[in-house]
Amino acid sequence: MAEIVIRNLRKDFGDFTAVQSSSFKIEDGEFFMLLGPSGCGKTTTLRMIAGLELPTSGEIYIDGEEVGQKPARQRDIAFVFQMFALYPHMNVRRNISYPLVSQGMSKRQVSEKVAEVSRILGIEDILDRSVSGLSGGDRQRVALGRAIVREPKAFMMDEPLGALDAEFREHMAEELRALHDRMGATTVYVTHDQLEAMQMGDKIVVMNHGVIEQFGTPQDIYDKPATMFVADFIGSPSMNFLRFHGEVHSGSSSVKLHHAELAVPTLREPFEGDLVYGIRPEHVSLVDAGESRGEVVAAEYLGTTQIVTVKTAGGDLKARIASNQSVRSGENVGLAFNGSAATLFDNQTGRALKSDLNEGVLAHV
């Protein structure tokens, strides 16, 4: 098991900076997610932790030892790739045992470890089969087995479920998290899938253009986004954004938006300029029109809930409401917001203004 500390990590490829001054801490035994869109620097960060890329600057500590310039073989880390990286000419048993045989372990010890790992992963019945004939899920289990059998300090996983279909990917995500909980191993996991990150991770780093936008628990990242990028990237549908120009004061608990007074968590800093009122769809309610606020333009049925799109003076917004609440396209409706869950953003920088809601969270940015 391992504690991993990253300090001011940077990676340049010529004139291009892939990772900029990243710092965070991965606790011993944590399931840690590196999340972001393609090209954000998450895989480069993972490869630097694993020793497959050397940083341009910065420090990497594994259990207190600085390893930033050490090769991968000296870090005692196992890597699981998206495309499995199995040896096609070997059967399952030989693929799993290969790291142990390479270390010179005795045949008896190898056999015992392979049997233990195959039992954990539920692949005892395919040990003598060729990997080329296996399903995607079984091949991923074999790849995990080959990593686990070494009992490394930490596991690095680069979108290991990305090649699986959606239904089986969800099943494997549950299995992988359960496996992590049984083993208690430190795991660093790269994904672009925010649902996967929220489902599996103890902590999440959200990256964008090589920069860490936010670092925290899944709940903090969802409920208390530090930037508009995080608010937009996390959640399906994403947060609603209503733009306006105004002035707020430290201690304010409401804002004036298009002639309406909207509640917000008590603000902890003043601001004047272009602002954005952010509210998640589940915190928007449809009420009697009264002074009509908007027109229903679409409703998407999702079983227990429905996503209703409402056209307003400030732009379209989405509300997540009960599926049995009757709405019709073209209907005029009133809107009510749960202001205690709202976030105000600086429209120019995308930064969330400090408030009672996010106090203590933004320090991670």
Image: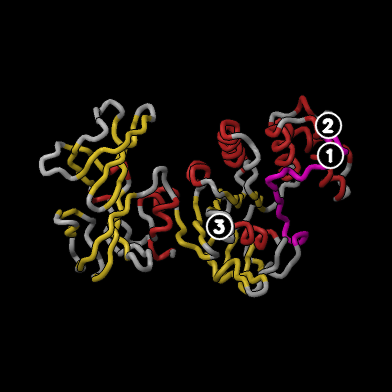
Question: In x, y percent, where is residue 76?
Answer: 73, 56
Q: Which residue is mark 3?
A: 26
Residue 88 numbered mark, or none: 1
Rate crowding at label 2 as few (under 14), some (14 to 19) or many (20 or more) other CA atoms within 10 Å. Answer: some
Image point (72%, 47%), residue name:
151
Question: In x, y percent, where is residue 9?
Answer: 59, 69
Rate crowding at label 1 as few (under 14), some (14 to 19) or many (20 or more) other CA atoms within 10 Å. Answer: few
Mark 2: which amino acid? Ser
**Most foreground residue, 276 or 141:** 276
Question: In x, y percent, where is residue 191?
Answer: 57, 49
**Most foreground residue, 289 or 44:** 289
Q: Using residue 319 as the reference point, say whether residue 151 is left or right of it.
A: right
Q: Where, by quadrant of the figure, is residue 266 drawn?
A: bottom left
Q: Secondary structure at mark 2?
A: loop
Check contact, mark 2 vs mark 1: CB within 8 A: yes
User: Earlier along the polypeptide chain: callout 2 or callout 3?
Assistant: 3
Q: Which segment is the magenta one?
A: 72-93
Is 84 part of what is drawn in magenta?
yes
Q: Which residue is mark 2?
A: 130
Q: Where, by quadrant of the figure, is residue 82 drawn?
A: top right
Disc 2 versus disc 3: distance between alpha carbons?
A: 37 Å
Mark 3: which amino acid? Ile
